[in-house]
Amino acid sequence: MPTPTPTPSAHRQRTCRACGRKFDYPVKGSPATRHHCEDCVIIPPDTRKVIERLNNRVTQLERQLDSLRRAAAPPPAA
Ligand SMILES: [Zn+2]
């Protein structure tokens, strides 16, 4: 009995944990890992950890800004 694959799409796009960039994974010849794009994979882990923390804050702030914008914007006139 074959094991079911969680993701049906073969072509995967991932978001880099450090810089938030969307990248394709896996790409032949690319050093990118499933969590980091090819630019961030060379950053030393200690430094990358700090960048990831900052990126998380940026992501949270963007989400908050988005919901604030939606709350402030009047509903589209029909
Ligand atoms: Zn990156």
Image: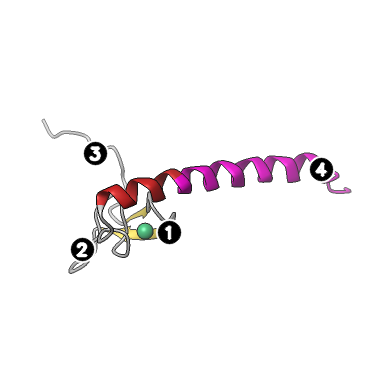
Task: Please state if 48 lies on the left or on the right of 26 as rendered.
Answer: right
> Tag 1: residue type?
Arg
> Tag 3: residue type?
Thr
Location of residue 11 by image quarter: bottom left
User: Which residue position is annotated with label 3?
Assistant: 5
Label 1 vs label 2: CA separation?
Answer: 15 Å
Disc 4 and disc 1 in contact, CB within 8 angstroms: no
Location of residue 33 by image quarter: bottom left
Label at residue 72 = 4
Q: Tag 1 or tag 4, which sits nearer the N-term?
A: 1
Label at residue 37 = none
- Pick out the residue farthest to the right: 77
Please indicate, yes or no, whether residue 41 appears anywhere in the rendered image: yes
SS at mark 3 in the image: loop
Instruction: Identify the residue at horizontal 38%, vertical 47% (top origin).
Output: 50
Q: Nearer the viewer, mark 2 or mark 3?
A: 2
